[in-house]
Amino acid sequence: MNRTTLSLIGAATALAAVTGVAALTGGSSDDADSATKAATRLPVQRSTLLCPTPSSSDVSSTTYTAYTPKRDGVDAKDGTAELLPAQNPADDVADPGDDGGKGDKNGKDGKKGGQPSPGGDKPVLPLKEPGKPVTTDEDSEGAPALIGTADGRFAPGWTVQQTTTIDAGSGRGILGTACTAPDTDFWFPGVSTDRNRQDFVHLTNPDDAAAEVDLKLYGPSGRLKPSTDESITVPPRSTVPVLLSTLTDQRAASASLRVTARTGRIGAAVQAVDQKAGSDWLPASAVPSTSVAIPGLPKDATSARLVVFAPGADDADLKVRLAGPNNSITPAGHESLHVKSGMTTAIDLGDVTKGEPGSLLLTPEGGDGPATPVVAGLQVTRGKGSDQETAFIPATGAIERSATAADNRTKGSTLSLVAPGATAKVRITASAGAGGGSPVSKTYEVKGGTTQALEPPRPASGKGPYAVTVERLSGGPVHASRMLALPQDGVPMFTIQPLPDDRGMVAVPEAGQDLSLLNDD
Protein backbone atom coordinates (compact mmCIF):
# COMPACT_ATOMS: atom_id res chain seq x y z
CA MET A 1 0.00 0.00 0.00
CA ASN A 2 1.25 3.48 -0.89
CA ARG A 3 -0.03 6.43 1.13
CA THR A 4 0.04 9.86 -0.54
CA THR A 5 -0.68 12.66 1.90
CA LEU A 6 -2.18 15.90 0.56
CA SER A 7 -1.86 18.80 2.98
CA LEU A 8 -4.61 21.39 2.84
CA ILE A 9 -2.20 24.04 4.03
CA GLY A 10 0.17 23.17 1.21
CA ALA A 11 -2.55 23.44 -1.41
CA ALA A 12 -3.78 26.74 -0.01
CA THR A 13 -0.26 28.12 0.06
CA ALA A 14 0.28 27.23 -3.59
CA LEU A 15 -2.83 29.22 -4.52
CA ALA A 16 -2.33 32.14 -2.18
CA ALA A 17 1.31 32.80 -2.90
CA VAL A 18 0.72 34.23 -6.36
CA THR A 19 -0.75 37.72 -6.76
CA GLY A 20 -2.26 38.63 -10.12
CA VAL A 21 -3.39 35.00 -10.48
CA ALA A 22 -5.54 34.33 -7.43
CA ALA A 23 -6.83 36.84 -4.88
CA LEU A 24 -7.89 35.15 -1.66
CA THR A 25 -8.42 38.29 0.41
CA GLY A 26 -10.46 41.42 -0.16
CA GLY A 27 -13.22 43.63 1.19
CA SER A 28 -12.91 45.91 4.19
CA SER A 29 -10.20 45.70 6.84
CA ASP A 30 -12.64 44.52 9.50
CA ASP A 31 -14.01 41.77 7.27
CA ALA A 32 -10.52 40.61 6.40
CA ASP A 33 -9.43 40.62 10.05
CA SER A 34 -12.38 38.52 11.22
CA ALA A 35 -12.06 36.10 8.32
CA THR A 36 -8.40 35.40 8.88
CA LYS A 37 -8.03 35.17 12.66
CA ALA A 38 -7.02 31.53 12.41
CA ALA A 39 -4.82 32.01 9.37
CA THR A 40 -1.11 32.24 8.76
CA ARG A 41 0.06 35.26 6.77
CA LEU A 42 2.70 34.54 4.16
CA PRO A 43 4.38 36.77 1.58
CA VAL A 44 3.34 36.25 -2.03
CA GLN A 45 5.92 34.44 -4.10
CA ARG A 46 5.15 35.92 -7.53
CA SER A 47 3.55 39.15 -8.80
CA THR A 48 2.44 40.23 -12.27
CA LEU A 49 1.95 43.87 -13.32
CA LEU A 50 0.80 45.34 -16.63
CA CYS A 51 1.55 48.89 -17.82
CA PRO A 52 -0.53 50.30 -20.72
CA THR A 53 0.95 51.99 -23.81
CA PRO A 54 1.74 55.49 -22.47
CA SER A 55 1.10 57.77 -25.47
CA SER A 56 1.75 58.14 -29.18
CA SER A 57 2.18 61.91 -28.94
CA ASP A 58 5.49 63.21 -30.26
CA VAL A 59 5.56 65.87 -27.50
CA SER A 60 5.35 63.47 -24.58
CA SER A 61 7.76 61.75 -22.22
CA THR A 62 7.19 59.05 -19.62
CA THR A 63 8.84 58.31 -16.29
CA TYR A 64 8.68 54.74 -14.98
CA THR A 65 9.42 54.08 -11.30
CA ALA A 66 9.53 50.57 -9.82
CA TYR A 67 9.76 49.67 -6.15
CA THR A 68 9.37 46.80 -3.69
CA PRO A 69 9.22 47.57 0.06
CA LYS A 70 11.44 45.75 2.50
CA ARG A 71 9.45 43.23 4.52
CA ASP A 72 10.19 41.10 7.54
CA GLY A 73 10.07 37.36 6.98
CA VAL A 74 10.97 37.54 3.27
CA ASP A 75 14.01 35.66 1.97
CA ALA A 76 16.67 38.35 1.48
CA LYS A 77 18.59 36.58 -1.29
CA ASP A 78 16.54 35.19 -4.14
CA GLY A 79 14.25 36.86 -6.63
CA THR A 80 13.95 39.14 -9.69
CA ALA A 81 11.63 41.94 -10.82
CA GLU A 82 11.56 43.26 -14.37
CA LEU A 83 9.26 44.37 -17.17
CA LEU A 84 9.34 43.37 -20.84
CA PRO A 85 7.73 45.10 -23.84
CA ALA A 86 4.42 43.69 -25.03
CA GLN A 87 3.62 43.13 -28.69
CA ASN A 88 1.08 45.32 -30.48
CA PRO A 89 -0.62 43.17 -33.15
CA ALA A 90 -1.98 46.22 -35.02
CA ASP A 91 0.05 47.51 -37.95
CA ASP A 92 -1.13 51.05 -37.27
CA VAL A 93 -2.26 52.54 -33.98
CA ALA A 94 -4.12 55.82 -34.03
CA ASP A 95 -3.10 58.65 -31.74
CA PRO A 96 -5.96 59.01 -29.19
CA GLY A 97 -5.86 62.77 -29.77
CA ASP A 98 -6.07 62.78 -33.56
CA ASP A 99 -9.04 61.01 -35.10
CA GLY A 100 -11.94 62.80 -33.43
CA GLY A 101 -13.60 59.55 -32.43
CA LYS A 102 -14.04 58.24 -35.97
CA GLY A 103 -11.64 55.29 -35.93
CA ASP A 104 -12.62 51.66 -35.84
CA LYS A 105 -12.90 49.68 -32.61
CA ASN A 106 -9.18 48.95 -32.53
CA GLY A 107 -8.33 52.62 -32.95
CA LYS A 108 -7.34 52.39 -36.62
CA ASP A 109 -8.48 55.10 -39.01
CA GLY A 110 -7.02 53.83 -42.28
CA LYS A 111 -4.04 56.16 -41.99
CA LYS A 112 -0.73 55.77 -40.30
CA GLY A 113 -1.37 57.09 -36.81
CA GLY A 114 1.50 55.64 -34.82
CA GLN A 115 4.07 52.89 -34.65
CA PRO A 116 3.53 49.30 -33.58
CA SER A 117 5.05 48.39 -30.25
CA PRO A 118 8.42 46.81 -30.89
CA GLY A 119 8.23 44.05 -28.30
CA GLY A 120 11.44 42.28 -27.40
CA ASP A 121 13.29 40.72 -24.52
CA LYS A 122 15.30 43.64 -23.13
CA PRO A 123 14.26 44.08 -19.46
CA VAL A 124 13.00 47.46 -18.29
CA LEU A 125 13.59 48.65 -14.72
CA PRO A 126 15.06 45.49 -13.14
CA LEU A 127 15.24 45.92 -9.36
CA LYS A 128 18.47 45.21 -7.52
CA GLU A 129 17.25 45.33 -3.94
CA PRO A 130 13.98 45.87 -2.02
CA GLY A 131 13.66 49.26 -0.38
CA LYS A 132 15.30 51.25 -3.19
CA PRO A 133 13.33 52.45 -6.24
CA VAL A 134 14.65 52.47 -9.78
CA THR A 135 13.51 54.94 -12.41
CA THR A 136 13.93 55.70 -16.10
CA ASP A 137 12.70 58.39 -18.51
CA GLU A 138 11.56 57.44 -22.00
CA ASP A 139 10.18 59.19 -25.05
CA SER A 140 6.54 58.10 -25.13
CA GLU A 141 6.11 58.04 -28.90
CA GLY A 142 6.26 54.42 -30.00
CA ALA A 143 6.80 53.19 -26.43
CA PRO A 144 5.15 49.79 -25.86
CA ALA A 145 2.94 48.46 -23.12
CA LEU A 146 4.91 46.51 -20.52
CA ILE A 147 4.39 43.07 -18.99
CA GLY A 148 6.19 42.56 -15.71
CA THR A 149 6.84 39.78 -13.23
CA ALA A 150 8.48 39.76 -9.83
CA ASP A 151 9.28 36.74 -7.70
CA GLY A 152 10.98 35.87 -4.45
CA ARG A 153 11.93 38.83 -2.29
CA PHE A 154 10.74 41.33 -4.92
CA ALA A 155 7.16 40.04 -5.22
CA PRO A 156 5.47 41.25 -1.98
CA GLY A 157 4.22 44.79 -2.58
CA TRP A 158 5.97 45.29 -5.94
CA THR A 159 4.62 48.43 -7.62
CA VAL A 160 5.36 50.33 -10.83
CA GLN A 161 4.22 53.88 -11.54
CA GLN A 162 3.91 55.25 -15.08
CA THR A 163 3.79 59.06 -15.33
CA THR A 164 3.50 60.72 -18.75
CA THR A 165 3.75 64.42 -19.55
CA ILE A 166 2.17 65.70 -22.78
CA ASP A 167 3.28 69.28 -23.36
CA ALA A 168 0.80 70.41 -26.01
CA GLY A 169 -2.31 69.45 -27.97
CA SER A 170 -5.76 68.35 -26.89
CA GLY A 171 -4.32 65.64 -24.66
CA ARG A 172 -1.86 67.89 -22.86
CA GLY A 173 -1.41 67.22 -19.17
CA ILE A 174 -0.05 64.70 -16.69
CA LEU A 175 -1.26 61.13 -17.18
CA GLY A 176 -0.43 58.88 -14.25
CA THR A 177 -1.28 55.29 -13.51
CA ALA A 178 -0.06 52.53 -11.26
CA CYS A 179 0.53 49.43 -13.37
CA THR A 180 -2.10 46.87 -12.43
CA ALA A 181 -2.37 43.15 -11.78
CA PRO A 182 -4.23 41.08 -14.39
CA ASP A 183 -7.79 40.06 -13.61
CA THR A 184 -10.97 38.89 -15.32
CA ASP A 185 -13.45 41.64 -14.41
CA PHE A 186 -13.12 45.47 -14.31
CA TRP A 187 -15.58 48.34 -13.83
CA PHE A 188 -14.87 51.86 -15.13
CA PRO A 189 -17.60 54.33 -14.09
CA GLY A 190 -16.94 57.76 -15.61
CA VAL A 191 -15.98 56.84 -19.18
CA SER A 192 -17.50 58.79 -22.04
CA THR A 193 -18.55 58.35 -25.65
CA ASP A 194 -19.20 62.09 -26.03
CA ARG A 195 -17.81 63.92 -29.03
CA ASN A 196 -15.57 66.06 -26.80
CA ARG A 197 -13.95 62.99 -25.26
CA GLN A 198 -11.88 60.20 -26.73
CA ASP A 199 -11.62 57.29 -24.32
CA PHE A 200 -9.46 54.29 -25.20
CA VAL A 201 -9.49 51.12 -23.14
CA HIS A 202 -6.09 49.40 -23.34
CA LEU A 203 -6.29 45.61 -22.99
CA THR A 204 -3.06 43.74 -22.23
CA ASN A 205 -2.72 39.97 -22.14
CA PRO A 206 0.26 38.69 -20.07
CA ASP A 207 -0.15 35.01 -20.92
CA ASP A 208 0.84 32.64 -23.73
CA ALA A 209 -2.72 31.99 -24.91
CA ALA A 210 -5.18 34.45 -26.46
CA ALA A 211 -7.75 36.14 -24.20
CA GLU A 212 -11.37 36.73 -25.25
CA VAL A 213 -12.73 39.95 -23.77
CA ASP A 214 -16.26 41.42 -23.69
CA LEU A 215 -16.84 45.19 -23.47
CA LYS A 216 -20.21 46.54 -22.34
CA LEU A 217 -21.21 50.20 -21.97
CA TYR A 218 -24.04 51.53 -19.78
CA GLY A 219 -25.39 55.06 -20.04
CA PRO A 220 -28.05 57.06 -18.13
CA SER A 221 -30.86 55.04 -19.74
CA GLY A 222 -29.23 51.63 -19.51
CA ARG A 223 -27.13 49.55 -21.87
CA LEU A 224 -25.75 51.51 -24.82
CA LYS A 225 -26.75 49.72 -27.99
CA PRO A 226 -23.65 48.21 -29.63
CA SER A 227 -22.94 49.14 -33.23
CA THR A 228 -20.32 46.46 -33.65
CA ASP A 229 -19.07 43.27 -32.05
CA GLU A 230 -18.14 44.05 -28.47
CA SER A 231 -15.93 40.97 -28.18
CA ILE A 232 -12.21 41.55 -28.56
CA THR A 233 -9.46 38.97 -29.02
CA VAL A 234 -6.20 39.94 -27.35
CA PRO A 235 -3.32 37.82 -28.71
CA PRO A 236 -0.74 36.29 -26.34
CA ARG A 237 1.57 38.76 -24.59
CA SER A 238 0.05 41.62 -26.57
CA THR A 239 -1.86 44.85 -26.07
CA VAL A 240 -4.90 46.11 -27.99
CA PRO A 241 -6.37 49.65 -27.71
CA VAL A 242 -10.11 50.06 -28.27
CA LEU A 243 -11.80 53.43 -28.87
CA LEU A 244 -15.03 53.32 -26.86
CA SER A 245 -17.02 55.62 -29.14
CA THR A 246 -16.67 53.07 -31.94
CA LEU A 247 -18.54 50.44 -29.92
CA THR A 248 -21.84 52.35 -30.09
CA ASP A 249 -23.57 55.11 -32.05
CA GLN A 250 -25.05 56.52 -28.85
CA ARG A 251 -23.32 59.46 -27.18
CA ALA A 252 -23.10 59.63 -23.39
CA ALA A 253 -21.15 62.26 -21.47
CA SER A 254 -20.95 59.88 -18.51
CA ALA A 255 -21.13 56.12 -18.87
CA SER A 256 -19.86 52.97 -17.19
CA LEU A 257 -17.70 50.35 -18.90
CA ARG A 258 -17.50 46.72 -17.86
CA VAL A 259 -14.53 44.70 -19.11
CA THR A 260 -14.86 40.94 -18.72
CA ALA A 261 -12.39 38.27 -19.83
CA ARG A 262 -14.36 35.20 -20.93
CA THR A 263 -11.11 33.28 -21.39
CA GLY A 264 -7.73 34.12 -19.95
CA ARG A 265 -6.97 37.22 -17.92
CA ILE A 266 -6.04 40.75 -18.88
CA GLY A 267 -5.00 44.13 -17.61
CA ALA A 268 -7.40 46.95 -18.44
CA ALA A 269 -6.78 50.70 -18.29
CA VAL A 270 -8.79 53.61 -19.74
CA GLN A 271 -7.09 56.69 -21.18
CA ALA A 272 -9.49 59.64 -21.26
CA VAL A 273 -8.68 62.61 -23.50
CA ASP A 274 -10.83 65.72 -23.12
CA GLN A 275 -10.60 68.34 -25.85
CA LYS A 276 -10.75 71.17 -23.28
CA ALA A 277 -9.68 69.76 -19.93
CA GLY A 278 -6.60 67.71 -20.73
CA SER A 279 -6.24 63.98 -20.21
CA ASP A 280 -5.45 61.30 -17.66
CA TRP A 281 -5.84 57.60 -16.95
CA LEU A 282 -9.19 56.59 -15.49
CA PRO A 283 -8.57 53.81 -12.94
CA ALA A 284 -10.94 50.90 -12.38
CA SER A 285 -13.34 51.12 -9.46
CA ALA A 286 -13.06 48.81 -6.49
CA VAL A 287 -15.36 45.78 -6.66
CA PRO A 288 -19.09 46.54 -6.19
CA SER A 289 -19.78 47.40 -2.57
CA THR A 290 -22.69 48.70 -0.49
CA SER A 291 -20.45 51.41 1.02
CA VAL A 292 -17.95 53.35 -1.06
CA ALA A 293 -15.00 55.64 -0.28
CA ILE A 294 -13.48 57.96 -2.90
CA PRO A 295 -10.39 59.46 -1.24
CA GLY A 296 -8.44 62.58 -2.09
CA LEU A 297 -10.40 65.51 -3.55
CA PRO A 298 -7.93 68.41 -3.84
CA LYS A 299 -8.75 71.50 -1.77
CA ASP A 300 -8.60 73.69 -4.88
CA ALA A 301 -10.88 71.53 -7.06
CA THR A 302 -13.02 73.84 -9.21
CA SER A 303 -15.50 71.08 -10.07
CA ALA A 304 -16.25 67.45 -9.29
CA ARG A 305 -18.54 65.07 -11.17
CA LEU A 306 -19.66 61.91 -9.38
CA VAL A 307 -20.57 58.86 -11.49
CA VAL A 308 -22.27 55.82 -9.91
CA PHE A 309 -23.52 52.55 -11.39
CA ALA A 310 -25.61 49.79 -9.79
CA PRO A 311 -24.72 46.52 -11.56
CA GLY A 312 -27.22 44.31 -9.76
CA ALA A 313 -30.95 43.76 -10.18
CA ASP A 314 -31.97 46.37 -7.56
CA ASP A 315 -31.86 50.14 -7.41
CA ALA A 316 -29.50 51.79 -4.92
CA ASP A 317 -30.36 54.63 -2.54
CA LEU A 318 -27.25 56.25 -1.14
CA LYS A 319 -26.31 58.89 1.40
CA VAL A 320 -23.63 61.28 0.14
CA ARG A 321 -21.13 62.70 2.63
CA LEU A 322 -17.99 64.75 2.28
CA ALA A 323 -15.33 63.83 4.86
CA GLY A 324 -13.23 66.93 5.45
CA PRO A 325 -10.31 67.69 7.79
CA ASN A 326 -12.51 68.00 10.89
CA ASN A 327 -15.79 66.17 10.27
CA SER A 328 -18.21 64.82 7.69
CA ILE A 329 -20.89 66.99 6.12
CA THR A 330 -23.65 66.52 3.58
CA PRO A 331 -23.06 68.50 0.38
CA ALA A 332 -25.83 71.06 -0.02
CA GLY A 333 -28.42 69.86 -2.52
CA HIS A 334 -26.91 66.37 -2.72
CA GLU A 335 -28.02 64.73 0.51
CA SER A 336 -28.96 61.49 -1.22
CA LEU A 337 -28.62 59.77 -4.57
CA HIS A 338 -30.96 57.30 -6.28
CA VAL A 339 -29.26 54.98 -8.77
CA LYS A 340 -31.44 52.83 -11.00
CA SER A 341 -30.36 49.28 -11.67
CA GLY A 342 -28.31 48.93 -14.85
CA MET A 343 -28.13 52.70 -15.40
CA THR A 344 -25.34 55.22 -14.90
CA THR A 345 -26.14 58.20 -12.68
CA ALA A 346 -23.95 61.31 -12.71
CA ILE A 347 -24.22 64.48 -10.60
CA ASP A 348 -22.19 67.68 -10.71
CA LEU A 349 -20.99 68.64 -7.23
CA GLY A 350 -19.30 71.89 -8.31
CA ASP A 351 -16.53 73.20 -6.06
CA VAL A 352 -17.71 70.93 -3.28
CA THR A 353 -14.49 71.07 -1.25
CA LYS A 354 -14.73 74.86 -0.66
CA GLY A 355 -10.99 75.26 -0.15
CA GLU A 356 -10.49 72.22 2.10
CA PRO A 357 -9.35 68.72 1.09
CA GLY A 358 -11.88 65.95 1.39
CA SER A 359 -13.16 62.52 0.38
CA LEU A 360 -16.58 61.35 -0.76
CA LEU A 361 -18.35 58.63 1.23
CA LEU A 362 -21.40 56.80 -0.13
CA THR A 363 -23.41 54.65 2.27
CA PRO A 364 -26.84 52.97 2.09
CA GLU A 365 -29.74 55.37 2.63
CA GLY A 366 -31.61 52.77 4.65
CA GLY A 367 -34.97 51.11 4.20
CA ASP A 368 -36.50 47.70 4.51
CA GLY A 369 -34.57 45.84 1.81
CA PRO A 370 -30.91 44.86 1.66
CA ALA A 371 -28.35 47.45 0.57
CA THR A 372 -27.35 47.42 -3.09
CA PRO A 373 -23.67 47.22 -4.17
CA VAL A 374 -22.43 49.97 -6.51
CA VAL A 375 -19.29 51.04 -8.33
CA ALA A 376 -18.32 54.71 -8.47
CA GLY A 377 -15.79 57.23 -9.70
CA LEU A 378 -15.15 60.95 -9.58
CA GLN A 379 -13.87 63.31 -12.27
CA VAL A 380 -12.04 66.22 -10.67
CA THR A 381 -11.06 69.48 -12.38
CA ARG A 382 -8.53 72.06 -11.24
CA GLY A 383 -8.09 75.44 -12.91
CA LYS A 384 -10.47 77.35 -15.16
CA GLY A 385 -11.00 78.14 -18.82
CA SER A 386 -8.15 77.13 -21.08
CA ASP A 387 -6.00 76.36 -18.03
CA GLN A 388 -8.12 73.45 -16.82
CA GLU A 389 -6.72 70.02 -16.04
CA THR A 390 -8.66 66.90 -15.11
CA ALA A 391 -8.03 63.69 -13.17
CA PHE A 392 -10.09 60.72 -11.99
CA ILE A 393 -10.50 59.08 -8.58
CA PRO A 394 -12.26 55.70 -8.37
CA ALA A 395 -13.94 54.08 -5.43
CA THR A 396 -10.95 52.60 -3.61
CA GLY A 397 -10.76 49.54 -1.39
CA ALA A 398 -9.50 49.80 2.18
CA ILE A 399 -5.85 49.21 3.03
CA GLU A 400 -5.82 45.92 4.90
CA ARG A 401 -2.11 46.00 5.72
CA SER A 402 -0.10 48.24 3.35
CA ALA A 403 -0.13 50.10 0.03
CA THR A 404 2.55 51.99 -1.91
CA ALA A 405 2.69 54.90 -4.35
CA ALA A 406 5.89 55.19 -6.37
CA ASP A 407 7.28 58.23 -8.24
CA ASN A 408 6.90 60.88 -5.56
CA ARG A 409 8.80 64.11 -6.12
CA THR A 410 10.44 66.60 -3.77
CA LYS A 411 7.54 68.93 -4.52
CA GLY A 412 4.04 68.17 -5.67
CA SER A 413 3.05 64.98 -3.81
CA THR A 414 -0.02 65.00 -1.55
CA LEU A 415 -1.19 61.90 0.32
CA SER A 416 -4.88 61.72 1.30
CA LEU A 417 -6.18 59.34 3.99
CA VAL A 418 -9.82 58.90 4.99
CA ALA A 419 -11.24 56.81 7.84
CA PRO A 420 -14.97 56.31 7.09
CA GLY A 421 -15.70 54.65 10.45
CA ALA A 422 -13.50 54.34 13.52
CA THR A 423 -10.26 56.28 13.97
CA ALA A 424 -7.26 54.61 12.33
CA LYS A 425 -3.56 54.71 13.08
CA VAL A 426 -1.13 54.47 10.16
CA ARG A 427 2.59 54.54 9.55
CA ILE A 428 3.89 56.31 6.43
CA THR A 429 7.37 55.47 5.18
CA ALA A 430 9.31 57.35 2.53
CA SER A 431 11.80 55.05 0.83
CA ALA A 432 15.30 55.98 -0.16
CA GLY A 433 15.39 58.01 -3.36
CA ALA A 434 16.35 56.49 -6.69
CA GLY A 435 19.58 58.47 -6.38
CA GLY A 436 20.32 57.57 -2.76
CA GLY A 437 19.32 58.62 0.76
CA SER A 438 17.74 56.88 3.74
CA PRO A 439 14.10 55.98 4.48
CA VAL A 440 12.05 58.04 6.93
CA SER A 441 8.88 56.94 8.76
CA LYS A 442 6.18 58.89 10.60
CA THR A 443 3.02 57.77 12.39
CA TYR A 444 -0.33 59.52 11.96
CA GLU A 445 -3.82 59.23 13.40
CA VAL A 446 -6.80 59.68 11.08
CA LYS A 447 -9.94 60.48 13.07
CA GLY A 448 -13.12 58.68 12.13
CA GLY A 449 -15.20 60.47 9.52
CA THR A 450 -12.37 62.78 8.44
CA THR A 451 -9.78 63.16 5.69
CA GLN A 452 -6.17 63.93 6.40
CA ALA A 453 -4.28 65.42 3.43
CA LEU A 454 -0.57 65.72 4.04
CA GLU A 455 2.74 66.13 2.34
CA PRO A 456 4.37 62.74 2.79
CA PRO A 457 7.74 62.47 4.53
CA ARG A 458 10.81 62.67 2.32
CA PRO A 459 13.88 60.44 2.44
CA ALA A 460 16.81 61.79 4.42
CA SER A 461 19.40 63.22 2.01
CA GLY A 462 17.51 61.52 -0.80
CA LYS A 463 17.76 62.30 -4.49
CA GLY A 464 15.37 61.40 -7.28
CA PRO A 465 11.87 59.90 -7.18
CA TYR A 466 10.94 57.91 -4.10
CA ALA A 467 8.13 55.65 -2.93
CA VAL A 468 5.67 56.19 -0.09
CA THR A 469 4.21 53.19 1.75
CA VAL A 470 1.14 53.44 3.99
CA GLU A 471 0.75 50.75 6.66
CA ARG A 472 -2.44 50.41 8.67
CA LEU A 473 -1.40 49.74 12.27
CA SER A 474 -4.72 49.72 14.15
CA GLY A 475 -8.26 51.03 14.26
CA GLY A 476 -10.88 51.16 11.55
CA PRO A 477 -10.60 50.90 7.78
CA VAL A 478 -8.54 53.54 5.99
CA HIS A 479 -8.63 54.43 2.27
CA ALA A 480 -5.91 56.40 0.50
CA SER A 481 -4.86 58.14 -2.69
CA ARG A 482 -1.84 60.12 -3.87
CA MET A 483 -1.93 63.32 -5.96
CA LEU A 484 1.11 64.34 -8.00
CA ALA A 485 0.94 67.98 -9.13
CA LEU A 486 3.39 69.22 -11.76
CA PRO A 487 2.15 72.67 -12.90
CA GLN A 488 3.36 73.95 -16.24
CA ASP A 489 2.83 77.29 -18.03
CA GLY A 490 -0.04 78.25 -15.75
CA VAL A 491 -1.85 74.92 -16.15
CA PRO A 492 -2.32 73.06 -12.81
CA MET A 493 -1.33 69.67 -14.25
CA PHE A 494 -1.99 66.84 -11.83
CA THR A 495 -2.85 63.16 -11.58
CA ILE A 496 -4.34 61.09 -8.74
CA GLN A 497 -3.66 57.41 -8.06
CA PRO A 498 -5.71 55.25 -5.66
CA LEU A 499 -3.81 53.18 -3.08
CA PRO A 500 -5.64 49.87 -2.60
CA ASP A 501 -4.04 47.16 -0.49
CA ASP A 502 -0.97 45.75 -2.26
CA ARG A 503 -1.85 42.13 -1.39
CA GLY A 504 1.80 41.54 -0.60
CA MET A 505 0.81 39.25 2.26
CA VAL A 506 -1.94 36.67 1.95
CA ALA A 507 -3.86 34.76 4.57
CA VAL A 508 -3.48 30.99 4.33
CA PRO A 509 -6.12 29.16 6.42
CA GLU A 510 -4.90 26.70 9.01
CA ALA A 511 -5.50 23.08 8.01
CA GLY A 512 -7.93 21.24 10.22
CA GLN A 513 -6.71 17.86 9.02
CA ASP A 514 -4.85 16.18 6.16
CA LEU A 515 -6.59 14.44 3.33
CA SER A 516 -5.10 11.07 2.47
CA LEU A 517 -5.43 9.05 -0.69
CA LEU A 518 -5.02 5.33 -0.19
CA ASN A 519 -3.76 3.39 -3.20
CA ASP A 520 -3.46 -0.40 -3.15
CA ASP A 521 -0.58 -2.00 -5.02
Image (spheres, rainbow, N blue to C red):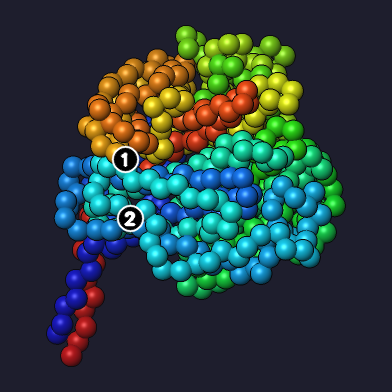
Outermost top residue: 326
**Residue drawn at x 56%, y 30% as measured from the top left:** 494
> Amino acid type of disc 1?
Ala
Dot 2, how many residues are within 10 Å of its Cα: few (below 14), some (14-19), or many (20+)?
A: some
- The residues tagged by marks 1 and 2 sit, at their Cα atoms, a distance apart of 13 Å
Between 443 and 216, the one lying in front of the other is 443
Q: Which residue is the site of mark 1?
A: 434
* Residue 454 can be seen in this image: yes
Quadrant of the rendered image containing residue 495? top right
**Residue lying at the far left of the rendered structure:** 1
Where the C terminus falls, by quadrant?
bottom left
- Residue type highlighted by circle 2: Pro
Q: Please give the residue where the numbered disc 2 appears in the rendered image.
A: 126
Is 41 in front, or is 253?
A: 253
In this image, 491 relative to 429: left or right?
Answer: right
Picture quarter with the N terminus: bottom left
Relative to residue 447, is residue 406 depicted above or below?
below
